[in-house]
Amino acid sequence: MWRAFFVTLILALTPHAILSAKTRKVEVLYEWKQVVYGFATEEDRQDAIDNDNLVPENATPIDVAVDYHSKKGKRVFTTTPRFTTGIPYTLALVTDKTEENGPVLLPYPDYSWHNSNGSNCEKITSVYRVAITECNQMILVDTGVIDDVQHCPPQLLVFDLNTDTLSHRYVFDPSIYIDVASLFITPIAIVNDPPPKGSCSKVKVYVADVNFHGLVIYDSELDAAWRIENRFMYPDPDYGLFSIADEKFFLMDGIFGLASDGEQLYFHPLSTIYEYAVPLSVINNRTIFEEDVEAVPLAFRRVGERSSPCAAQAMDSQNNLYFVTFNPIKLTRWSPKKPYTPKNELDIPADPQLIEFVSGMKVHKNKAGIEELWMTSNRFQKISRDTLDFNEVNFRLLRRPLDDIQKVSSSNNSHRESGSSSNKSHSESGSSSDESSSESGSSSDESQSESGSSSDESHSD
Ligand SMILES: *[C@@H]1O[C@H](CO)[C@@H](O)[C@H](O)[C@H]1NC(C)=O
Ligand SMILES: *[C@@H]1O[C@H](CO)[C@@H](O)[C@H](O)[C@H]1NC(C)=O
Ligand SMILES: *[C@@H]1O[C@H](CO)[C@@H](O)[C@H](O)[C@H]1NC(C)=O
Ligand SMILES: *[C@@H]1O[C@H](CO)[C@@H](O)[C@H](O)[C@H]1NC(C)=O
């Protein structure tokens, strides 16, 4: 009895003790040579095969999201959009069962939900990214597109993670998107009445339209959406040629990565080195954009410049902005207290081989109240150039706890100098243990780039 008590006590205390002792590492939690699609039943597998929809070599994991707080226990999700056919399901749960090519996926919520050939728009057609809120909701945006065919209108679906049932569906009106031209790839959600006090009825979802260069705002109170366009959402041709780990490829993607500190929406196109922002108070006001999607152009500002482009980004509760630059490949943070410049990119040590093209990034607070950075890397340069080798590890889900970094930030909180104050509607970080960490998170000792020797042009297209 007492023994059990002490064991429990030690287990409860150990993580903190170990974790605060040294700088945290980027951990690989799941890795694949090729995506492994599992099925709940043999009938489901056979259905996928019969419909030519089980072609794992066509699949690319794009996003990651973690359910830490629902009644179902911890669950990790990923997405495999239908860039092409052969994808049996587009939203998946990652299981701990592993086969030769990697961990086995299972369809979420179940196989019957997945519209494998575009014939049923009540189902899920293709998902790039999802958002999980502190209300135990999964918010997903379905593009409705398979292989460049707009089978269904894009829609926003809300699943209750406690019950794995649909709690809301919003189908976007034709005024919000352009058939085939639009591609709704990134949602972030802000809950304005979070638990325990709030009732989760005031949620806004911000959605990037990467291909037709717009931002869509969905307001759950109005159950309405509106569209906004601005020149900063376009790709810059000067940054349309990328080099990642010595492989070059072209990609002209517009608005891609989103983040918010509760006051501003931060965003960047993929094909750029700049970060932009617009006040939420402006874009949340539907009236302003009713007549003109390009209204108030001067409310949008350039707020930063990177050393090189990046794909996904995420912000923690202390307004640190995280991203992985392409060349050199670096996991990086911008502090809210310093101007967003290349000089102020604070390197977070990480093996560059693990983080080639981070297409999905989230900050999730774990059960112990520690915020963690989660990432999906998928070597998109190899997909783009068709050089994927399925004998190598190509896709990874990674985690990096942030408490060491946040201690450094908070020990300096009294000297805030920048204009971006932290007025967050998100839940505060559980800044538990107070002892000052012995090592700062921003040392860059082990982050030498492996891709130093890339000066000769070798693009094939
Ligand atoms: C589409 O897929 C469904 C479910 O797998 C199947 O029943 C149906 O026959 C398919 N339709 C076409 C046109 O392939
Ligand atoms: C929204 O914008 C309109 C038009 O500029 C303005 O009249 C109105 O006061 C704004 N509403 C809010 C809640 O700020
Ligand atoms: C705190 O901020 C000051 C000024 O920005 C900086 O010089 C100092 O290194 C910071 N201290 C820590 C512990 O980060
Ligand atoms: C935080 O938000 C509240 C409500 O929106 C506002 O009244 C307050 O002035 C804000 N505080 C700061 C520091 O911006």
Image: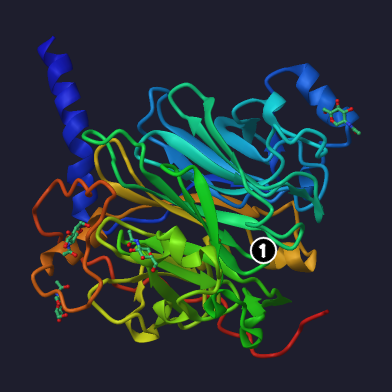
Task: Tell me the residue at 41%/68% (across/down).
Answer: 266
To which residue does mark 1 refer? Answer: 380
- The quarter of the image that holds ligand 2 is bottom left
Q: How many numbered dots are placed on residues in this image?
A: 1
Task: Tell me the residue at 50%/41% (across/down).
Answer: 139
Q: Residue 394, how many percent across, how many down?
A: 65, 55
Regarding mark 1 in the picture, which secondary structure is present there?
helix
Residue 288, located in which quarter of the rendered image? bottom left
* Left or right: where 312 falls relative to 108: left
Image quadrant containing the C terminus: bottom right
Asked whether 76 or 36 is in front, the reply is 76
* Left or right: where 312 falls relative to 441: right
Residue 286, located in which quarter of the rendered image? bottom left
Asked whether 204 or 183 is in front, the reply is 204
Q: Residue 264, how many percent across, how many down?
A: 35, 66
Q: Residue 258: in sight, yes or no? A: yes
